[in-house]
Image (cartoon, coloured by chain):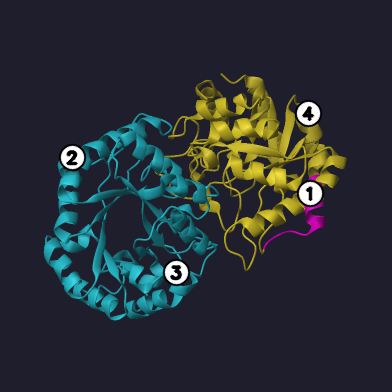
Chain colours: A cyan, B yellow
Amino acid sequence: MIARTRLALNTATLGHNLPGHGAGWPVERVIDACAGRGFGGIVFWRGELAGRARAVGERARAAGLRVDGLCRTPYLTGPDAASDDDLRAAVDDAAALGAPVLTVVTGGTETGTVGLQASRARLADRLAGLAEHAGGAGVRLVLEPLNPMFGGNRTVIFTIADALSVCEASGVPDLGIAVDVYHVWWDGTLAASCAAAGGRIAGLHLCDWMRDTSDMLLDRGMMGDGVADIPAIRAATEGAGYTGPVEVEVFSRRWWAADPGHVLDTIVERLPGC
Amino acid sequence: MIARTRLALNTATLGHNLPGHGAGWPVERVIDACAGRGFGGIVFWRGELAGRARAVGERARAAGLRVDGLCRTPYLTGPDAASDDDLRAAVDDAAALGAPVLTVVTGGTETGTVGLQASRARLADRLAGLAEHAGGAGVRLVLEPLNPMFGGNRTVIFTIADALSVCEASGVPDLGIAVDVYHVWWDGTLAASCAAAGGRIAGLHLCDWMRDTSDMLLDRGMMGDGVADIPAIRAATEGAGYTGPVEVEVFSRRWWAADPGHVLDTIVERLPGC
């Protein structure tokens, strides 16, 4: 049973509060709707902040919510890799927001390479370089492994074990790892990998894997609607000692079409089964 | 360097020779086109045989090709699981064709369950039941783990390690495992898992993972066009002692639109890089 105070909304679940995705509620309305339902925290996306990260963070805390994180860095590897300045700007946004965690999605494989070794080596190097700036800003970088279907252009790490090996190669002691149900539900080594990662486990993202996933990006399920064993995944993180926020992140055209208040009510209703 | 005699065409690469997929060449023309280019073998799909499995097998052998396998069983698990009779019929088709190997795609998760444990237990049971019939028919069952994006509705095994654990649970000594580049290219534990599987490694399927895979099913790459480290994957199978057929299986709308002769020439041309 997850305490309601651990529950956080990832705003992607309501379509990033952006017009054309979901109902387009203003960020203040999302904050109040979460606080009113007893959510403990909220996680924003950079595109929603529009230069007012500090004000949004203060508004969330004034409403009684923790700001649990910010999504996400631009890519660190592959042909679309961002400059060092752009990476540091993402850290600065997290710091201004007062978010303790900045999620890292790695980017794809390095141009002209095959396999993952060269890309992971570059990833570790760039993380080591960014970590100093992040440490100074009080922001923890957290790697999120993605489902192997996103290999090639979005990520070069697919499992908690992959992420842990990059953490170790980077030499960054507090580099964290996020466990997202959608990405790792299928991994039979999850409990062992989380245990090996220990204190590096720094996030648990809830959603569900729909049996007939029809769209790689925008067909995530609400907890309880799919085939992931969510309590087992939660237990794997707790076995590693993780007691932090539990963030609901459902990218779904179906849920974006629903009333945001109903989406939030459904999250609260499903929490005891997680 | 893979010897040309190991090279086999999986007919899916030309659109299963079926009208509407690829050029719709009759199976005899496909056989002759492969034999003429020095392919060593060919792997058929059940839908192409249309009750003449024995004749097609004889025709292939008369042209100088091995028949290396048949794709595939209906599902063993999940709501679309086939009856025992339907599973045995797939074995009988392989036997009539003279194919030493029948590929097994498991099917999805069992209705009313979450996670994979219950589904894998049922899978092991059904494989044990089918193995007796297969053994009597001289057909080896070979499990093919699929990319995790196919979890839920098409498969309950995602890695060579998953497949090995099902093999062991089934108690079937000669149950094999196929290593398909598309499905396992991302797996950092591949070499170790293949070594652990040893003599169970019973197939190597070549294609490539395109950096920007746009369609889960029909956007596979030709070897050399993507980001998979194919020589490393081949080496992993050879480290396990595998020296059998190397089967090219490219499901791709792009390649289906090309002239089949050009597709076959391209395969031959790319083989030295594999």
- Marks 3 and 2, Cα distance to the nearest angstrom? 36 Å
Q: Residues within 10 Å of mark 2 (few under 14, many from 20)?
A: few
Residue under disc 3 on the same chain as residue under disc 4? no
Check if residue A124 falls in the magenta segment.
Answer: no
What chain does badge 4 belong to? B
For residue B76, say whether it is visible.
no
Q: Residues within 10 Å of mark 4 (few under 14, many from 20)?
A: some
At x 55%, y 31%, the residue is: B191
What chain does badge 3 belong to? A
- Bounds of the magenta span? B80-91
What mark, if any, has residue A84 been given in the picture? 2
The residue indicated by pointer 4 is B61
What mark, if any, has residue B56 been given in the picture? none
Q: Amino acid at mark 3?
A: Met
- Marks 2 and 4, Cα distance to the nearest angstrom? 60 Å
The residue indicated by pointer 3 is A222
Q: Nearer the viewer, mark 3 or mark 4?
A: 3
The local secondary structure at tag 1 comes to helix
